[in-house]
Amino acid sequence: MQTGSSEIVRELRIAARPETIFEFFVDPQKIVRWKGRLASLDPRPGGGFLVDFNGDDIAAGEYVEIDPPNRVVFTWGWKAPGHPIPPGTSTVEVTFTADGDGTLVRFVHSGLPQPAVEEHAKGWDHFLPRLQVVAEGGDPGPDRRDRPGRKGATSMGNPVVHFELYGHNTEQLNTFYSEAFGWDIHADNPMNYGMIHTNADGKGIEGGTSEGDPRVNIVIEVPDLEEALAKIESVGGKTVTPPTEVPGVVTFAEFSDPEGNVVGIVKAE
C-alpha cells in the first residue's frame, strides 16, 4: 500500500473472478452492499455515478471508461455546496487482473488536494475490505463506521431520518419538486426510486419519491423493528407492512397511527 502526495493506491487479492468483482462497481444494488445506502449508477462513458452514504455525504461524478471486466474509471467528488472536492474533480481507477482462481484488484484515487488525501485513504481502507468480503460471498454486516452527522446516533432516541413522496406519476412528481425547490432527484436505478438530494448543505434530511397512492411518509430510525411494532400496537397503532429486507440496502416496516397516518420505520445500522 502507498499514499502519494495527491494519490491513493491500494492493491488487494480477492478470491473471486474479475467479472464478479466488476459488477460491484456498476450495479447500484451491489455497490451498496459494501458502501453507501443508496446508489444511482449509469455505467457508460459520461453516465452518472452517485452514492449516498447517509443523506449528508453524497459522492458524485461520472463514468469515464468502462471495460468489463478489466477496468472501470469514474470521477469522484462531493455534492455538498462549497465542498473543496466538488463532483468531477478527482478520479478513481480500478483494474481487475485474473490471478488463478482469484483477482488482483488495483485501486487508484488521484487528483485529490493534499489535505484530503488522509481522510479519503481512511475511507477507502474501511470500504475496500468490505468489498472483499461481499465479493467472496460473505456478508460484511452493517456499516458502523463513524460518519459526519451520524456520531452518537444510538444515543439520540428515535430520529426521523428520511421522507418519501408517493404518487401515480412519479416523473411528474420529480419534475415538480426539482423545479419548485431546486432539488436533485435521481431515479435511474432498477427500482425507479427517486433519490432526493435537497442541496441544503447538511440541514434537514433527504428523501425519495416512489409510485403509490398520493401521500407523504416520514421514516423513523429504531434499534429493533419487531420491538418497535409491538410497542406501537400496544398503544393503538397497527402494522401496515411487516419487517421487510431490501438486500444490501435497508430493512424497514410501516405502521399506521390511531388517525390512520402511515409512517415508516427503519432498522438502525
Image (cartoon, rainbow, N blue to C red):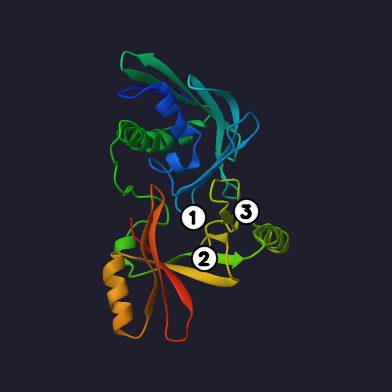
Instruction: Return the residue at label 2.
Output: 163
Q: Earlier in the sequence, mark 2 or mark 3?
A: 2
Q: Position of residue 260 (x, y in %)?
A: 47, 82
Residue for point 67% across, 62% down: 169
Name the one closer to the observer, 221 or 56: 221
Q: Distance between the Cα atoms at labels 3 and 1?
A: 13 Å
Q: Distance between the Cα atoms at labels 2 and 1?
A: 11 Å
Looking at numbered disc 2 in the image, what kind of residue is underneath it?
Phe
Instruction: Return the residue at label 1.
Output: 55
Q: Is residue 152 above or below residue 107?
A: below
Instruction: Return the residue at label 3.
Output: 185
Q: Is residue 169 above or below residue 100?
A: below
Q: Which mark is on residue 143?
A: none
Looking at numbered disc 3 in the image, what kind of residue is underneath it?
Ile
Q: Distance between the Cα atoms at labels 2 and 3?
A: 13 Å
User: Left or right: 87 with respect to 94?
Assistant: right
